[in-house]
């Protein structure tokens, strides 16, 4: 046998494999063992076993997010439903995130990933503006920062983004996938309801649209996702970013599932309402505190050392 396949080298490699790793180890051994045990128990269907337990799932937005370019700016839209597995975790989740005064971003995927990713890039853009004497942030700069961060984590950060904004180069809309790939488009959709929304965009989008036409088209696209996708629902949020620097954020622009009017229409019996004085007071007595209470004069103020 050669020196690469002899028994001595084989035994030495086995000994090296059994040795403990040197230095710091950040492996979550106990956590991973617990997750494997819970996954194995749930896959076997043995729910009555003492080892089986509920394996927590990440809260995902399960989303419909859209963005389009019109004549004088950008319109972004999103629904407001956040799901945890098959349950609705939040009916009024905000999915349009602030990045810069002229740049906003819609997020689909894991709610925590989209929130913290946009917060991190927003702080980096703020620092960049401070270092460049307060000049306006470029949309392509935000896109580059986001794609570099997501590519670094190889898709393990579940954040599918629709980036929109206006700068000196004009209005821009980018789609950013969790693995870091990007595309610049006149209109785009992402999320579980993206196919329904894209059908509305492909039918109704046109160049040089007015702001009113763009907002109405975005509302129709989000409503298509709400009514045709189980992961999307609740209300429609709309954000308009204009070339003159103004931004309009409209939370709850459309509320197709508002049940309050239906509840108000129900006539309930007034006998269920307990009026004041129905229950008689038999005895009432007031006793002052034995120490007379505490006032500001009893409080000693100590100056803080600086």
Image (cartoon, rainbow, N blue to C red):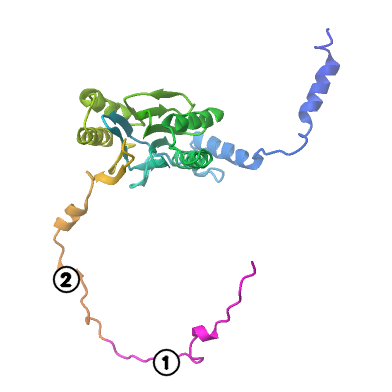
Q: Which mark is residue 287?
A: 1
Residue 229 showing in the rendered view: no
Q: Secondary structure at mark 1?
A: loop
On the image, the x and y values in percent for residue 84 come to 41, 42
Quadrant containing the N terminus is top right
What whole-number distance in Å separates the C-alpha atoms at marks 1 and 2? 36 Å
The residue labelled by disc 2 is: 271
Q: Earlier in the sequence, mark 1 or mark 2?
A: 2
Q: Out of 164 and 27, give the one closest to the viewer.
A: 164
Magenta stretch: helix, strand or loop mostly = loop
In front of the other: 264 or 161: 161
| Quarter residue 62 falls in | top left
Give the total number of marks visible in the rendering: 2
Query: Please, what secondary structure does the residue beneath circle 2 have?
Result: helix
In the image, taking residue 85 as reference, residue 27 lies left or right, namely right
Residue plotted at (19% across, 55% down): 263
Whether the magenta-drawn stretch holds residue 286 is answered as: yes
Q: Residue at x 47, y 33 (%)?
A: 158
Residue 74, x across and y down, in percent: 31, 33
User: Which of the two discs, 1 and 2, sits closer to the camera?
Assistant: 1
Q: Which residues are magenta?
A: 281-306
Q: Residue at x 22, y 24 (%)?
A: 206
x%, y% of residue 191?
36, 31
């Amino acid at each position: 046998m050669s020196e690469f396949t002899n028994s001595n080298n084989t035994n030495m490699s086995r000994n090296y494999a059994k040795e403990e790793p040197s230095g710091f180890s950040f492996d979550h051994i106990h956590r991973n063992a617990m997750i494997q045990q819970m996954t194995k128990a749930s896959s076997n269907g043995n729910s009555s076993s003492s080892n089986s337990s509920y394996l927590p799932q990440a809260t995902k937005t399960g989303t419909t997010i859209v963005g389009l370019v019109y004549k004088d700016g950008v319109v972004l839209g999103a629904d407001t439903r956040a799901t945890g597995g098959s349950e609705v975790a939040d009916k009024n989740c905000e999915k349009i995130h602030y990045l810069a005064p002229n740049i906003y971003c819609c997020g689909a995927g894991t709610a925590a990933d989209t929130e913290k990713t946009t917060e991190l890039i927003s702080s980096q853009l703020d620092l960049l503006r401070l270092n460049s004497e307060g000049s306006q942030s470029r949309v392509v700069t935000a896109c580059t920062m986001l794609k570099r961060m997501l590519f670094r984590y190889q898709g393990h950060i579940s954040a599918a983004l629709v980036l929109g904004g206006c700068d000196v180069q004009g209005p821009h809309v980018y789609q950013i996938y969790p693995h870091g790939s990007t595309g610049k488009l006149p209109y785009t959709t992402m999320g579980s309801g993206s196919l329904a929304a894209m059908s509305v965009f492909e039918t109704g989008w046109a160049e040089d649209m007015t702001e009113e036409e763009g907002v109405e088209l975005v509302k129709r696209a989000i409503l298509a996702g709400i009514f045709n996708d189980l992961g999307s629902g609740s209300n429609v949020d709309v954000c308009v970013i204009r070339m003159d620097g103004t931004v309009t954020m409209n939370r709850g622009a459309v509320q197709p599932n508002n049940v309050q009017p239906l509840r108000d229409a129900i006539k309930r019996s007034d006998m269920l309402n307990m009026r004041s004085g129905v229950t008689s007071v038999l005895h009432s007595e007031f006793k002052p505190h034995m120490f007379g209470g505490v006032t500001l004069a009893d409080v000693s103020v100590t100056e803080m050392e600086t």
